[in-house]
Image: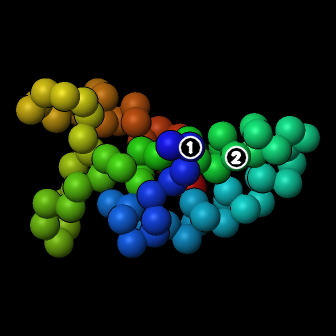
Amino acid sequence: NGHRPNPEDRLFNSTTIEKLIASYKPRFINPNLAKLFENSFPNCLDTTVVKASRNDSFIITGDIEAMWLRDSTNQLMPYVGL
């Protein structure tokens, strides 16, 4: 649909990610690319983080039951430096 989930529907919310998106969007010459970045960069956090307990979370890695550490790690790599 081209839009991020509403904040209340996101599985994970981060003010750091929101600030980063806001700081990068004006740098794009093409507004369509800015929108693509705004929607795609936080997608993993918005849609795949599942809180298992107070101290544990899982990253949904695909359509199988196994939660592959390799896949979960790669999904989170863009956020590690933040």
Give the residue displayed 30% in from the left and 52% down from the top: 49
Image quarter of residue 16: bottom right
Left or right of 20? Residue 57 is left
- Residue 1 visible, this angle: yes
- Residue 79 visible, this angle: no
Give the residue displayed 40% in from the left and 36% down from the top: 75
From the top left corner, tell me how far across and down residue 26 is, in percent.
Answer: 85, 54
Helix, strand or loop at label 2? It is helix
The kind of residue tagged 1 is Gly
Q: Residue furthest front?
A: 1
- Vertical position of residue 1 compared to residue 26: above or below: above
For disc 1, the marked residue is 2
Q: Quadrant of the C terminus?
A: bottom right
Colour setting: rainbow
From the top left corner, tell me how far across and down residue 72 is, in percent.
Answer: 30, 36
Asked whether 30 or 20 is in front, the reply is 30
Image quarter of residue 62: top left
